[in-house]
Each structure stands twice: as structure tokens, then as C-alpha cells.
Amino acid sequence: MKFSKRFKVLAIGLTLVLTLGSVVGCDSKESEKPKESSQSQDKASYKEATGEEAVKMMKKNKELLILDVRGAEDYAKGHIINGINISVDDLEDKLSALEGYKDKTILAYCNSGKKSAKAAEILVKNGFKDVYNVEGVKDFDYELVTYNDITAPEMLKLISENKDSIVIDARKSKEFETGHLKEAINIPLEDTEKKMGELDKNKDIILYCRTGNRSGQAAKILSENGFTKVYNSVDGVDEYDFDLVK
């Protein structure tokens, strides 16, 4: 009987030792798990968005930047409205062109999401604070356009280098009268179809408005009617400090 009690005590003690050992073993394994790599942390620094979510953001936030990181050939075939083009291979060399967007939302996209993920990593590593990698154009049915979307500095450079270009202010006449680019003529968005017969299809046509929205719509109308050298500034007079005249 005494032997039986001793045996029970030993058995209980052995069970406790084994239990404690397994707990310690688990803790050791947990402590051996590798920490997140800096690359993983970088990836966590940008956000993912579906095509549907991206479209909602585009409609809600007119000051965000849409960045197409595909090659120029893919971009020319069709890109998201107001999407400027900087290929992922050129992005690090052209970050200075995006300096004004460091505190703004940037939606990066490509065909499948792979190149735009790489681009998003580059952006967050260089101090861009609100970056999204959004669903690619092959996976979501975005509305695509074929004219060129450019930033305000790119537009001003294009105007200065091409004195023969046609610069169109797509705002209403009352807005135009409050201040406009000295090279600009005024064709409000609603008059685009009526007035486009007066425009030379062989010349560069450069458009702007307050936010890039109305000028983008006008650019779309022109490109759908045979104009092939159409440029829309995604930065309007409300967003960029243009030198305006009255």
C-alpha cells in the first residue's frame, strides 16, 4: 500500500516535470522564430487596395496621384484616367518629380500588381507616407484612356519647348477670367465637341483646369475623336502654383 502511494507521488512528479519541459520547449521554439525582415516591414508600410476600393478613392480624393509603373508601350495602349507614367525601372531616378506628393495619397498600379508592389516599396523607403499597391488593369475592369496624363512641371516644360502647341483651359469662362496661363485659350469642357473642329490634329494639345478632372474629360473626348497628341495636366490651378495672368 505504501509502495502504491509512493508510486503515485513519483508518477505525479514525473508528469509535472514533463509538462513543464514541454512548456519551456514551446517557449524556446517561439523565441527562435525569426523577426520580420526589413523587407517585410517595408511591405507592411504600404497598403493593398482592390480595384473597386481604388476607384472609390479616386472619386473621393481629387488630390491623390495615380501612378502607372508599366512601360510606355503598355501605358499608351490604355491607362487609368489621370494616371501618370513612370516605369518601375525608372522610378528611383525620377523620384524628384514626385516630391510634391510625399504627404499625399499615391495609388501605384501595373498589369498584375507585381511591378506596382515593387514601386510601392521604393516609394515608402524614400519617405512617401500614404502609398497603395492597387489591383492591376488585367485583373479589374477600370475605365482606360489613351491620352497622356502629365504633372504640372511636365506640362510647363512641354509648353516652353513647343511654342506651337495648343494650350486649353477647360474651366468655365468666369473661372478663366480670374486667372489663366498666358498661352491658354478657353474652351470649357461642355464646349469641347462643338469647338474641336477648330483645333489642328497635328499639334500637341495640352489641357488643364482646376484639378485635372474636367481637362481629363475634355482630353478623353479629343482622343476619342482622332486627336493623338493630347496631354492633360493632373495638377490644376487649385493644386499647383502656376504663374497666371488675367
Image: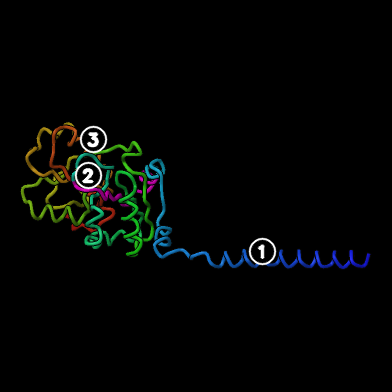
Which badge, 3 or 2, is on the more N-terminal residue? 2
Q: Which one is in front in this view, the residue at disc 2 or the one at disc 1?
A: 1
Indicate yes or no whether the magenta region holds residue 5. Answer: no
Query: Which amino acid type is marked by label 2?
Result: Tyr
Q: Residues within 10 Å of mark 2 (few under 14, many from 20)?
A: many
Using a 10 Å C-alpha cutoff, classify the residue at mark 3 as few (fewer than 14 neighbours), some (14 to 19) or many (20 or more): some
Residue corresponding to mark 3? 190
Q: Position of residue 237 (x, y in %)?
A: 25, 52
| Magenta highlight range | 57-72
Q: Secondary structure at mark 1?
A: helix
Disc 2 marks which residue?
75
Q: Nearer the viewer, mark 3 or mark 2?
A: 2
Per the model, the C-alpha gap separating discs 3 and 1 is 75 Å
Task: Report the residue at 76% width, 63% height from top.
Answer: 15
| Secondary structure of the residue carrying numbered label 2 | helix
Query: How far, Cα to Cα, is label 2 from label 1?
Result: 58 Å
Q: Can see residue 246? A: no
Residue drawn at (81%, 67%) of the image: 10
Residue 211 image point, x, y percent: 28, 48
Q: Which mark is residue 22?
A: 1
User: Callout 1: few (<14), some (14-19), or many (20+) C-alpha neighbours within 10 Å?
Assistant: few
Give the quadrant of residue 51. Answer: top left
Instruction: Indicate left or right for 121 with 205 as reference.
Output: right
Q: Judge whether residue 65 is colored magenta.
A: yes
Q: Which of the pair 34/210 is nearer the observer?
A: 34
Residue 24: quarter of image: bottom right
| Numbered disc 3: secondary structure | helix
